[in-house]
Amino acid sequence: MSYRNKTYVAFASEDIRLYRLMEAWRDNKNIDFNFYDAHDLYISQDTSLPATIKRNLRQRMGNAKQIVLIGTTEAKRKGGDGRSFLAYEIAVMQEFNLPIVIANHNGNKTVDRNFIPKPLLDADYYTLSVAFSPAAIRYALNNYAVSFSSSDNSGPHHYKQSVYDRL
């Protein structure tokens, strides 16, 4: 496995516009938001076989040090259906024991179980839910993600309002 320095952004295919918005935040010099995108590695074509796509997804996550899961009802549904590529990604995230920041697309600052895929809830996997905003996501990646491996927390968590007040 190579050096893990990337952020892997996971999302339901219906939510690609939200991923594109994150890329726009990153590329806008007036917004303090940056991430090394794991999606730039091991590109699959739309015509690739499912086994090839899954192999590439696994390789991308092998380079990831953290995950941002764009939290939507579609992400919850697909992440828990056991068949979709997002469900596969959720399983690999857990296998690799990666920190997962759930970015609630509706701006909710608390845990919204309507956006968290069932496998993460069933496993009581330590996740952090934040509002879908550059400041909140950046803060979570800089703080929660780096302390994830040394934490004994489990299940979904969120920041107190005081964190958002400081942001």
Image (cartoon, helix red, strand yellow):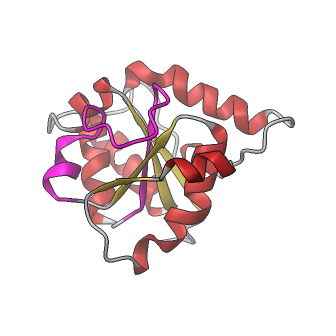
Q: Which quarter of the picture shows residue 69?
A: top left
Q: Main secondary structure of the magenta part?
A: loop
Q: Which quarter of the picture shows residue 94?
A: bottom left
Q: Is residue 111 above or below residue 13?
A: below
Visible residue check, residue 78:
yes
> Is 91 left, or right, of 41 in this rendering?
left
In the rendered structure, which segment of residues is drawn in magenta?
Answer: 98-124
- Residue drawn at point x = 60 percent, y = 35 percent: 133
- All told, the count of numbered labels is 0
Q: Position of residue 4 (x, y in %)?
A: 55, 68
- Residue drawn at point x = 31 percent, y = 34 percent: 115
- Residue drawn at point x = 51 percent, y = 37 percent: 131
Outermost residue, bottom side: 150
Q: Position of residue 34 (x, y in %)?
A: 71, 48
- Residue drawn at point x = 13 percent, y = 52 percent: 122
Q: Is residue 115 above or below residue 94?
A: above
> Is 155 left, or right, of 111 in this rendering?
left
Q: Position of residue 62 (x, y in %)?
A: 44, 62
Q: Is residue 33 magenta?
A: no
Toward the viewer: 33 or 114?
A: 114
Outermost residue, right side: 29
Q: Is residue 34 above or below residue 50?
A: below
Q: Position of residue 48 (x, y in %)?
A: 38, 32
Q: Is residue 99 magenta?
A: yes
Visible residue check, residue 41:
no
